[in-house]
Structure formats: C-alpha cells, structure tokens
Amino acid sequence: MMRAGLVQLTIGDDPVENLPETVKRVRSAIAGGARFVLTPECTNSLSSNRVRQQSFFRSEAEDATLAALRDEAARAGIWLLIGSLGVLTDDADGRFANRSFMIGPDGGIVVRYDKIHMFDVNVSETEVYRESLSYRPGRRAVIADTPFGRVGMTVCYDLRFPHLYRMLAQAGAEIIAVPAAFNHITGSAHWEVLLRARAIETGCYVLAPAQTGFHPEKEGKGRRTYGHSLAIAPWGEVLADAGTKAGVVFVDIDLAEVMQARDRVPSLVHDIEFDGP
C-alpha cells in the first residue's frame, strides 16, 4: 500500500508569486503521509499571453519551480510528479514545451513527458483556446518506473484520446497520471466521466491533480478551471475528490486492485484486428 497526495492549486501567471503556495501544498501532502505527490498541469504559470510567457518561462536548468520542487522531493525522500511546467525550448518557431516531470526521492529527474495533444478548441464564443500557437506537441509516450508501480504520464487534453491510455496500459502502466488545468465548462460536462472511463478501460489507477477556480493574469482576462482533482480506482470508483478549493486529497494505492480488475475483465489482451470502415 502506498499513499499518494494530489495537490490542487489556484495560481496566477507569475511563477515567482506562485511558487510559495505550491511548496506549501506539497509540504502539506508530505505531512499527510504521501510518499508520492502530484501537482497539476501548469504548476509554474497559467497564462494566455505569449509575450508574458516568453518573459518569465525559463529553460529546465534555470526554472526556479523545477529546482524548488526537486529540493522538496530530496528533502522528504519522496516521489514527486510535477504535473507540467511551461519551459523554453530550442525550437526555431519559439514555441514552449508543456512538460511533465517525474522526480525521484534523490531529487533527480527520472523521466520527462511533453504533452502530446494540444488544446485547440472552441468551447464557446468567449472560450477559445489555441494551445498549439504557444506550445509544441510532444512525440513520445512515457512510463516512469517506480518502486510502487509503473506510472504512465499524460497531461490534460490527452484524456480525450483513449488509444494513448490503452497503449500505456498494454506497455505495463499500472497507474496513470492526468495532471490538468481543465476548462470549467468542459470539466463540468466531461471530466469525471472521462477519467472513470480511462480507468475502466485500462484497469489502472488514474490520478488527476487539477487547477481550480479563477486564475488572474496581469495582462489578460484570466481564466477559470474546474478543479475536482480525482483519484479513480481500476474498477472505476471515485476514491477521492478535492472539490473546488485549493488543497490536497489523499488516496492509498494497492496494486492488487489493478490485477483484480484486469483478471475480471481482461480486455487489454482481447484486441482483434478488423477491416474498415
């Protein structure tokens, strides 16, 4: 049995101002007994202004949020999933990476995952997003090997692409992380049902730490996220729900539940090739 702590945040666009609250919540998760702590997507900054992003995003080597959270993991000897950070890249077009990090108990970066699917959607006349204008998509699915299980790494909009989750589970993932800054409109309609579906389809624990509430921008209109960080069992039950306030929720992971779910419905080994349409 292993205890995980899902951190729920309400951040703004300035990484320096956001960091103290993030560290506080991570320490709260550790104090609550979590040996695996997960933060949401956009842990360092939630911004829609590319000029602002360019001014305060940094490379991995210079990112203060990454450095501070690596120190926290090493100090406490825990595993820490940084849901994602906006980081600078060497891409010719200047786009950033939306990058998730698994940090080991020595503070080292075990694996990195760049979000594959970009949130380019028209939720409503006033809720239009074009993530691909600022961020370039990743190209590689990633699993992190840990003492408490194999963790498949995904981010937010990836949730709508079930083939990624099936691929991760068939490659050995027992836990799948879905850190998110899920839109408040689509979140209300789809967040829980999609997370439960991904857990049921894969027989994995699904851990989804999220941003919540209104996120102000110094140069921009700000945005709202749905919250409700969720932990889902391999059979599809909701084990923890953080609601809509910043904080931490806990869940105890028992990999025997993964094996039991997959033994009961072994759909991961029932693929059949077919033609059409």
Image (spheres, grey):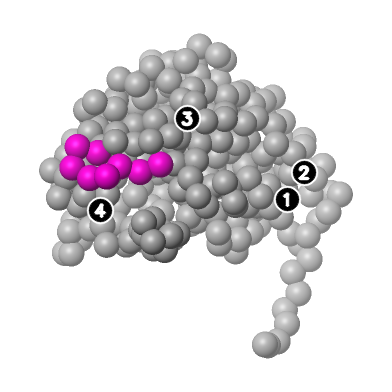
Q: Which residues are the magenta region?
A: 217-224
Quarter of the figure with the C terminus: bottom right
- Residue 153 visible in this rendered orientation of the protein: no
Q: Amino acid at mark 4?
A: Phe
Callout 4: helix, strand or loop?
loop
Q: Is residue 218 magenta?
A: yes
- Label 4 packing within 10 angstroms: few (<14), some (14-19), many (20+): many
Give how far apart the Cα atoms at labels 1 and 3 are.
24 Å
Q: Is residue 252 above or below residue 155?
A: above
Q: Which residue is mark 1?
A: 200
Could you say which quadrant of the image residue 212 lies in? top left
Q: Which mark is residue 96?
A: 4
Q: Position of residue 247 (x, y in %)?
A: 49, 22
Looking at marks 2 and 1 on the same chain, the residue that comes earlier in the sequence is marked by: 1
Q: Is residue 32 left or right of residue 86?
A: right
Looking at marks 4 and 2 on the same chain, the residue that comes earlier in the sequence is marked by: 4
Could you say which quadrant of the image residue 39 lies in? top left
Q: Is residue 142 above or below residue 60?
A: below
Point out the residue furthest to the front here.
125
Q: Which residue is mark 3?
A: 8
Residue 8 vs residue 254, the one in the foreground:
8
